Amino acid sequence: MTSTPRFAAEPAYRHGQPAKTAVIYCNLGTPQAPTASALRRYLAEFLSDPRVVEIPRFLWLMILHGIILRVRPAKSAHKYASIWTENGSPLKVWTERQSLDLQTKYDPQHVQVRYAMRYGSPAVSAVLDELKTQGVNRVLVLPAYPQYSATTTASVFDAVYTWGLRSRLLPEFRFVNHYHDHPAYIAALADSIRAHWTANGRAEQLVMSFHGVPERTLKLGDPYHCECHKTARLLAEALGLAKNEYKVCFQSRFGKAKWLEPYTEPTVRELAKTGCKSIDIVCPGFVCDCLETLEEIAMEVKAAFIEDGGSQFHYIPCLNDSPAWINALHSIADTHMSGWAMPQNTSAEREASRQAALALGASD
């Protein structure tokens, strides 16, 4: 016998109410503080997601709670402490700033831009609850992941679907699967690298490091590997690079299983050992600087390169709040909201819109 679903309380329905639209810009998430206890809570939620770890659940939960959550939080807390800012986690700082800047492109009376985190706060469900009380009935879900992976993008969608299971009147949803080859995204990446070259000179090699995933995901049909390589190819073409002038590799391997190769640290070590003295490294799959870029790449991988004979290592920051990237986000959002008629902000209205966006952010 099927049980009757328990729906959350609904706002009063008003016949003929005008359409209200929102963009939820969703990133991975971050611990609330660089402490072992905060990391334990965050990692417990993150690593319990079956999209993230695809091994038999009972076995994995025994390993997670019996070993990993007893050891890893303290080590991870030390790493987070090395990149923490007075305003908190860099990932949260940049994600919030990107959402506020994207809000300036729209009249907040017609389109609200909010950010959410898949793990941690503000949760996807909490943001959807708040938007619903405000009468929002059209929602674009825009993940901060240019390349699609079941481990990231699909997990964001899962959070939306799960929220929908307890809602009677659902908004009209649209989902952005990927934008790995969007011209404005590629152009924003190319602009950031050219700006670095103008300011610092150009190294012998450009290394493009993407977040890794287990190799078996490729064999199971996940397009992530292919989309990373397409991003790299398009970026190299935009920069006019020959194939021998750049490397594509994958970082952040976790566990003993084989992940996508080549791995980033061994790649830069090999470059140093074979006589390459200078490299520039960029992480095109990350649109916000975070632990994986600021600590793993700019500290750990740099140390590996120098240790094996390299002399000049330059990490090129993520897109963060660069105007070209905000314009790209706007272009991506507009494409997917096609048909949802809404007024755009003029340049004269943008400062007022920004203040409204800041007020919305302060209410979180």
Image (tube, helix red, strand yellow):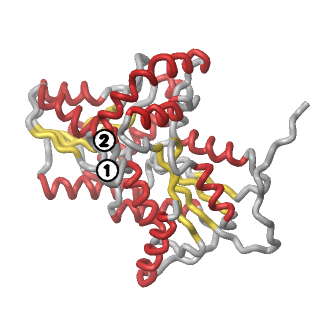
Eyeballing the image, is 176 above or below 19?
Answer: above
Quarter residue 310 falls in: top left
For residue 353, side relative to residue 300 (left or right): right
For the residue pair 57 and 253, the one nearer the viewer reads as 57
- Residue 290: x %, y % from top left: 34, 44
Q: Which residue is mark 1?
A: 318
Amino acid beneath label 2: Thr
For residue 262, side relative to residue 130 (left or right): left
User: Residue at the location (39% across, 32% down)?
Assistant: 36
Q: Residues within 10 Å of mark 2 (few under 14, many from 20)?
A: many
- The kind of secondary structure element at disc 1 is loop
Q: Which residue is mark 2?
A: 293
Eyeballing the image, is 276 above or below 86?
Answer: above
For the residue pair 290 and 177, the one nearer the viewer reads as 290
**In the orientation shown, which residue stands out farthest toward the right?**
1
User: Residue at the location (12% across, 53% down)?
Assistant: 200
Q: Residues within 10 Å of mark 1 (few under 14, many from 20)?
A: many
Amino acid beneath label 1: Cys
Quarter residue 158 falls in: top right
Q: Are marks 1 and 2 in contact (CB under 8 Å)?
A: yes
- Residue 280: x %, y % from top left: 19, 43
> Which mark is drawn over residue 221?
none
Eyeballing the image, is 234 above or below 207?
Answer: below
How far apart marks 1 and 2 lie (CA) works out to: 8 Å
- Residue 328: x %, y % from top left: 42, 61
User: Residue at the location (46% across, 17% down)?
Assistant: 67
Image quadrant containing the N terminus: top right
For the residue pair 313 and 85, the one nearer the viewer reads as 85
- The kind of secondary structure element at disc 2 is helix
User: Residue at the location (70% across, 58% down)?
Assistant: 172
Upstream in sequence: badge 1 or badge 2 = 2
Eyeballing the image, is 30 above or below 253?
Answer: below
